[in-house]
Amino acid sequence: MNSVTLLGTKGGPAIRPGTRMPTSILVQMDGMTVLVDAGLGVARGLCDAGVALTDLDAIIITHLHSDHYLELGPLLHTAWTAGLARTIPIYGPTGLAHYWHGFLNAMSFDVELRLRDEGRPPLEPLLDVHVLQDGETALGGLKLTAIRNAHPPIEDSFALRFEGASQTVVLSGDTAPIPEMVDFSHNADLLVHEAMLSAGIDALCKRVGNGDDRLRIHLERSHTPAAEAGRIATEAGVKRLALNHLVPCDDPDFTDAHWQEETARTWAGPLFIGTDGMKIPLD
C-alpha cells in the first residue's frame, strides 16, 4: 500500500518530556521505501512504523539543520549492526559528505573493532552520497523533482515532489511561503507542508530561554503560517493537506483546534495535523 508516514513532526531540534520528535518522513510508493530527513528519533520511528532499517531504498536530506540530519549517522550505523550489507544512495546538500566522514571518524574505534571482532562489511561504502540539486532524479520507478525553497540563511534547502505511476506527493521542506510551491504542488494527491502558528511564537521564544531576538526573526522569515500553507494547497488544487514540522507543537495553550481554525481560513479540504507515527494512505 502506498503511503506517507510522518515519523517526526516537531519543528526545531529541542525535545522535552512529552514532546514530539524532530522531522523525518517515510515515503512508500510503487515498491520504493524512501526516508526524507533523519532528525532525532528516526531509527525508533522507522521501527515503530514496521520498517526494518535494512529495507531503506534511499535517503534524502532536505537541508543541513540539525533537526533534519542529526541522526543520519547513528541510523546508518544501527542499520549496519542490524545486517545492512548493500549500499544506500543518499541525496543531500553540499556538506553532507563532510558530516558522514566526520561521523565515521568519531566512531572509528567502534567500527574498526566490529570489522575485526564481528566480521562486518566495511561501513563507509554503504552510503553513496549524491549532491541534491534542482531538477529530476530517478528513484526506482519514482520520479523525484527538487526545487530550492526559501529557508534563510540556508541557501541549499529543498522541496521535493515524488511522482509514481498514479500518485504524486509533495513535501515542502522547511520554507517560508513561496509562489513556486503552487505550481510545484499542482494536483498532488498529498501536500505535506510545514506550518507555524504565529500566535505561538512569543511563548516559544520565551520557553527556549537561551536565545535572543534572532530566533524570532528566523522563525518569521523562514517558516510558513498555517493559513499560508492552506492557501498554497487551495491554489495548487491538491487533494489532501498535511501540516508538519509544527511550530509550536508542545505548548498546551495551542491545540489541534487552533491549527484547524487557522488553516480553515484558506483550506476547506481534508486536513491532517501531523503527529508522530501518523500514516496517511495514498490508495
Image: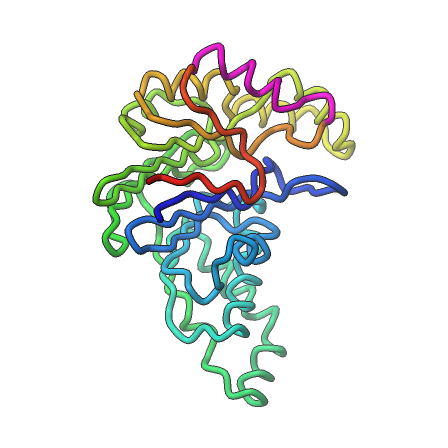
The residue sitting at 34% across, 26% down in the picture is 239
Is residue 258 or residue 138 the one in the foreground?
A: 258
In the image, residue 253 lies at what x, y percent?
73, 21
From the viewer's perspective, tell me whether residue 15 is left or right of residue 122. Answer: right
Residues shaded magenta? 252-267
Displayed quadrant of residue 85:
bottom left
In the image, residue 195 lies at what x, y percent?
52, 26
How many numbered marks, from 0 up?
0
**Image height of 69 relative to 256, above or below:** below
**Image height of 129 relative to 160, above or below:** below
The residue sitting at 33% across, 40% down in the picture is 283
Is residue 174 or residue 210 the one in the foreground?
A: 174
The residue sitting at 51% across, 46% down in the picture is 24
**Structure colour scheme:** rainbow
From the viewer's perspective, tell me whether residue 156 is left or right of residue 214. Answer: left
In the image, residue 192 lies at what x, y percent?
43, 33
Is residue 168 or residue 161 the one in the foreground?
A: 168
Displayed quadrant of residue 166:
top left
In the image, residue 146 lies at what x, y percent?
32, 40
Displayed quadrant of residue 127:
bottom left
The residue sitting at 41% across, 55% down in the picture is 59
Is residue 74 or residue 191 the one in the foreground?
A: 191
Whether residue 262 is in magenta: the answer is yes
**Image height of 173 relative to 85, above or below:** above
From the viewer's perspective, tell me whether residue 175 is left or right of residue 19. Answer: left
Whether residue 280 is in magenta: the answer is no
